Image (cartoon, rainbow, N blue to C red):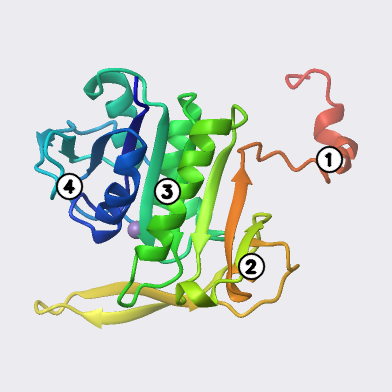
Amino acid sequence: MRPLILLTNDDGIQAQGLQALFRNLQQLGEICVVAPDTERSAVGHAITLTAPIRVDPYQFPGSGATRAFACTGTPADCVKLAVKTLLPRKPDLVVSGINPGANTGLYVLYSGTVSAATEGMILGIPSIAVSLDTWENPDFDTAGNFAQRIAAQVLKSGLPRGTLLNVNVPAIPPSKICGTRLTRHGRAVYDEEFHKRSDPRGRVYYWMSGRKADISENPDTDTEALKAGFISVTPIHFDLTDEKHLHEFRSWEVFAEQNIHS
Ligand code: MN
């Protein structure tokens, strides 16, 4: 049986990056698409609990018989719903993207793209997030091509349970790409600011903007790999425990109390 591959994103089902994923991955297996009906970038791992989730069949461009659905939920909702109800069987692979804009450092936490892959991982499916390091006139060819190669590798080799791959591709011509680097999750942050404006009714609103802060890190991090012209592949897992400092908290009086009622 051909592998079943679920594609999703956080940019909406009409996004070009998703179409690029589809074009590049269709030769690897049977494709299903379940993606948000509109853009849901930076919703992180949100799920919908207080509203109904609606799903509409969608004619994915050039896809023929491909099963595709537009969903009113978040990227994590899309993956949950796909795996638990919409797909004929559990997929062999989840690929999320291709996101315009890198998802490195702290932005992994805000990213809907990565969270969709995280949800796949939580459900026990090998999962990959793919992002391209530009918002401006993104050309998804190189990232799509690499998505195909890494997807084929994951279908062949599998992934450790509890680990997903976060892929970031530099936005430079293919001939300038120096290679592929296995990286660590870095500390990249954004310098953010709020623009204060007034709407036509005179009410104040705020709109956040920002650009990646210029910090330098170890060369083995995701952001530094991109800067140096490498495709970055970071294996990610979600044990958020602060192992390094865990013991320091043992001296706190609050942990010495044997009975919190005494
Ligand atoms: Mn996005």
Residue flagged by tag 1: what amino acid is it?
Answer: Phe
Q: Residue at x 31, y 73 (%)?
A: 206
Residue 62: x and y in percent read 13, 48
Mark positioned earlier in the residue sequence (4 or 2) = 4
Residue flagged by tag 2: what amino acid is it?
Answer: Ala
Mark positioned earlier in the residue sequence (4 or 3) = 4
Indicate whether 115 appears above or below 167: above
| Element at label 1 | helix
Q: Kindly report the distance in space between the C-alpha atoms of the residues bearing marks 3 and 2.
A: 20 Å
**Could you say which disc has been placed on residue 249 in the image?**
1
Mark positioned earlier in the residue sequence (1 or 3) = 3
Whether the residues at callouts 1 and 4 have beta carbons within 8 Å, the answer is no
Residue flagged by tag 3: what amino acid is it?
Answer: Gln
Q: Residues within 10 Å of mark 4 (few under 14, many from 20)?
A: many
Q: Kindly report the distance in space between the C-alpha atoms of the residues bearing marks 1 and 3.
A: 46 Å
Left or right for 66, reference 5: left
Depth-wise, is mark 4 or mark 2 nearer the camera? Answer: 2
Q: Read off the residue under disc 3.
A: 148
Depth-wise, is mark 4 or mark 3 nearer the camera? Answer: 3
